[in-house]
Every structure is written in C-alpha cells, then in structure tokens.
Image (cartoon, rainbow, N blue to C red):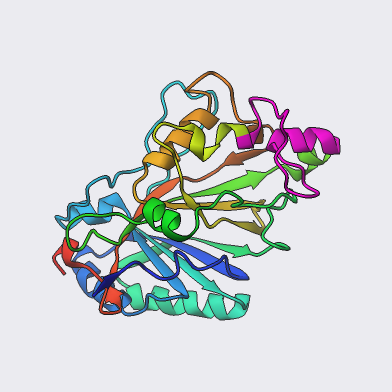
Amino acid sequence: MTTPQPGIARPVPDASRYLTFRVDERAEVGAALAALAGEVGDDLVVGFGASLVDAHGGEVPGLRELPALPGAKVAVPTTPAALWCWLRGVDRGALLLRGRAIERLLSPAFVLDDATEGFRHGSGRDLSGYEDGTENPKGEALVEATYAVGAPGIAGSSFVAVQRWHHDLARFGRLDPMAQDRAIGRRRADNVELEDAPPSAHVKRTAQESFDPQAFVLRRSMPWSDGRGHGLVFVAFGRSFDAFEAQLRRMVGIEDGIVDALFDFTRPATGSFFWCPPLRDGRLDLRVLGL
C-alpha cells in the first residue's frame, strides 16, 4: 500500500531540525537510502533533490531545481542539495541526537552540508509576531493541493520548497504597529485581514485564490535562531512546484513590478526544491530510483 509521508500533514511540532546533505560516495548511495527508508514516519520527512534523482536514472515529472528568476526586483538565491531531512519532535536535545544518528546512517554516501534548528513560537507565529500558515488548505483541499497523482512510485508523493529567511527585526521594530500590519496585510492582534491593505502587503502578494490556476500550498514553516541570526525556515509542500513559483514570481515583482513588503525587513539566504517520495508498506518507496 502506498501512502504519503505522514509527517507532511501533521501540525507544526514544538521543535524541528532541518538537515541538508551532499553526495560524497556515490557507490554507497543505494545502501544509504535503503537504510534511511525505514526511518521515515511522523517524526521524519525526507526529500530528494533533482541531482540525486537524475544521478540514479530516476524520472520524476516536475522535479527541478529552484530556477533563476529573470526580471526579479530582488535576489532570490538557489542553493541545491541532494537530500533533505526534516526531523520533528518536542526536545531539541533528542532531535540533535536523532540527527547525529541519521548522519551516521547515511555515511559515507552522504555528508552533512547544513543543520538548522526550528522552534514553535507561541501559537505558531513568526518572530515578527504574526501567525503563519493562516490560509493552509484543510481536508480534501489539503490532499488535492499537497500530493501528486500519477504512476506507482509517484502517486502520493509531494514536492517541497525550502528557504531560510533572515529577518532584520530591528528594522521591522522601527515601524509603527500600523505600518507593520500594512506590510503583512493582517492585524497582528487578531489576525484579521486588512481590507485596505496596500498592493505590496504580503497577504495581497500571495493570496492563493487570486492566481489562475489557484496557487494553494501547505505551509509548515517555523522560526529559527542561531549564531548566524534569526528568521523563518519557510517550508511549502505542493503537488508540484508550480503554486510556489507563481507566488514567488509575484512577490519579487515579476508579474506587475510591485515587490512584496516582506523584502523590506527579511531576505532568503537559501532556496532548495526537493521531492518527497511516498511510503510503500511503511517504508520510502524508492522504485523511481530503481531501488
């Protein structure tokens, strides 16, 4: 029986650890992925980069790297990776140890490139104080927006866009509360959308129902903070990358020249696309890679 990875639809946890890997010993990749296949569950979501799938002769329709955006008014970096692991839990120490165990499991095939800790803030708010994921689809709409359809090995999979955004909270804090609300397009106090929000408001830029076709994604973002700074690990799952790309193109002003007000106080430092294969009998379905 084939099913989506269960951690995708689960609510945002109290704590997360995001790991990205590069391939080091290609001959060992098959054995490493076979070992990883049984680890996926509520507490772990796994995604493959286009380079990993291509290197093993796999074909996943729609899988690609985050593209360059000609005409963008602000820079959006693309930082491809071979493998992404999202560890979910309640205890940061336990997640650190779990992550180290996964590193050992994947060695010597894969080498860790980056590790970022995420945490839940309040009721699920960004560090700016605004709720995140307010417009997430639910029920059947979630299934339709999040999971791919297609041949065995593809059906039930999901595509995910991952970016680490760095906030300038000092700059944001210099805005008066009304200006902050207008930049987001919602009132922080009650999360109600502003009827008179400017065209640059984030809510206006990314209103999912305003695209043709509609651009719904399932957001599972969380704040992060370490010695590099602080911000948001943006995570958006979809049945393809199309909805995310449509929103991003509008945010950076390609569509109409208007740049999302978010860029006044935060910028992405990373940007990666991954494909999250489904499970078959409780293990990652690796048939697309011939495993």
Residue 79, percent across and down? 42, 45
Q: Residue furthest top?
A: 257
Q: Can I make out residue 40 in this image?
A: yes
Q: Residue furthest front?
A: 140
Q: Can I make out residue 113 in this image?
A: no
Q: Residue at x 28, y 50 (%)?
A: 50
Q: Residue at x 55, y 36 (%)?
A: 206
Quick check: 122 left or right of 58? Answer: right
Residue 224, percent across and down? 63, 58
Residue 90 occupies which quadrant of the picture? bottom right
Quick check: 117 left or right of 284? Answer: right
Instruction: Please tell me whether residue 188 belongs to the stretch shown in magenta.
Output: yes
Residue 36, percent across and down? 32, 75
Residue 23 occupies which quadrant of the picture? bottom left
Q: Residue at x 73, y 28 (%)?
A: 196
Residue 5, percent across and down? 37, 68
Quadrant showing the N terminus: bottom left
Q: Residue at x 71, y 30 (%)?
A: 197
Residue 279 occupies which quadrant of the picture? bottom left
Q: Please name the predominant secondary structure of the magenta segment in the image.
A: loop
Magenta part of the chain: 176-203
205 to 243, vertically: above or below: above
Quick check: 274 left or right of 125? Answer: left
Instruction: Please tell me whether residue 10 belongs to the stretch shown in magenta.
Output: no
